[in-house]
Amino acid sequence: MQIIRGLFYGTGCHQPFLMPILVRDGVERILSVDDLNVSFWVKQQEVNKCMVTWRQLRCTFTRVLGSNVTMDGKYTLYFEKSVAATPQNNILRGMGTMSGSQETVRGSVVVIKQRHDAPNLIMDMTKCDQLAVNYLLSRYARDLCRS
């Protein structure tokens, strides 16, 4: 069984955690982010409802617009399917407040890292990646709330 480490920003958490992200059943070799089973950490479907396509609940960043920050990989963020009862994310609410946003992301978020030069090569996240992802999330907190 293959496992990739991702960064988890849970709704009830006060800090992000490195978490194991499993590969989907039946996948022998990871070919893309579509092969990861992120639904264990972020609820992307409602009970008795059709599955929403994952591409609607994720976004990938290759750089931070309007910034000179160099990212050493691509970061893909997975969001929960937001419904009225989905709680606010405490960690991201704090980041949004620091950037002047009154809005906040609802639900948990998982972040996966890919290499720039080999887009289908998924890398384990480390604590060092957390700083880059925090910066990314704080810069885009307002936009992420509207997606």
Image (cartoon, helix red, strand yellow):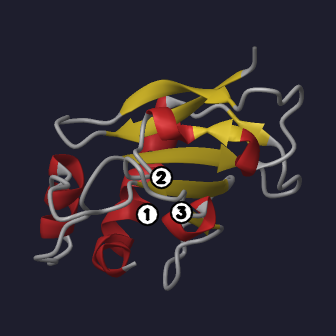
Does 17 appear above or below 81?
above
Q: Quadrant of residue 3?
A: top right
The residue sitting at the top extreme is 1
Q: How many marks?
A: 3
Whole-angstrom CA distance, mark 2 to mark 1, is 6 Å
Residue topped by disc 2: 132
**Tag 1: amino acid:** Leu
On the image, the x and y values in percent for residue 34 come to: 73, 50
Residue topped by disc 1: 136
Whole-angstrom CA distance, mark 2 to mark 3, is 29 Å
On the image, the x and y values in percent for residue 42 come to: 41, 43
Instruction: Kindly identify the residue that appears in the image at 40 percent across and 37 percent down.
Output: 8
Q: Is residue 17 left or right of residue 92?
A: right
Q: Secondary structure at mark 2?
A: helix
Mark 2 surroundings within 10 Å by alpha-carbon count, few (fewer than 14), some (14 through 19), many (20 or more): some
On the image, the x and y values in percent for residue 2 come to: 75, 20
**Tag 3: amino acid:** Val
Cβ–Cβ under 8 Å for marks 2 and 1: yes
Q: Is residue 28 left or right of residue 42?
A: right
Tell me the quadrant of the picture where the C terminus can be found: bottom left
Instruction: Kindly identify the residue that appears in the image at 10 percent across and 76 percent down.
Output: 102
Residue topped by disc 3: 52
Nearer to me, 122 or 68:
122
Instruction: Kindly identify the residue that appears in the image at 46 percent across and 31 percent down.
Output: 127
**Tag 2: amino acid:** Ala
Mark 1 or mark 3, which has the lower sequence index? 3
Q: Secondary structure at mark 3?
A: loop
Mark 3 surroundings within 10 Å by alpha-carbon count, few (fewer than 14), some (14 through 19), many (20 or more): few
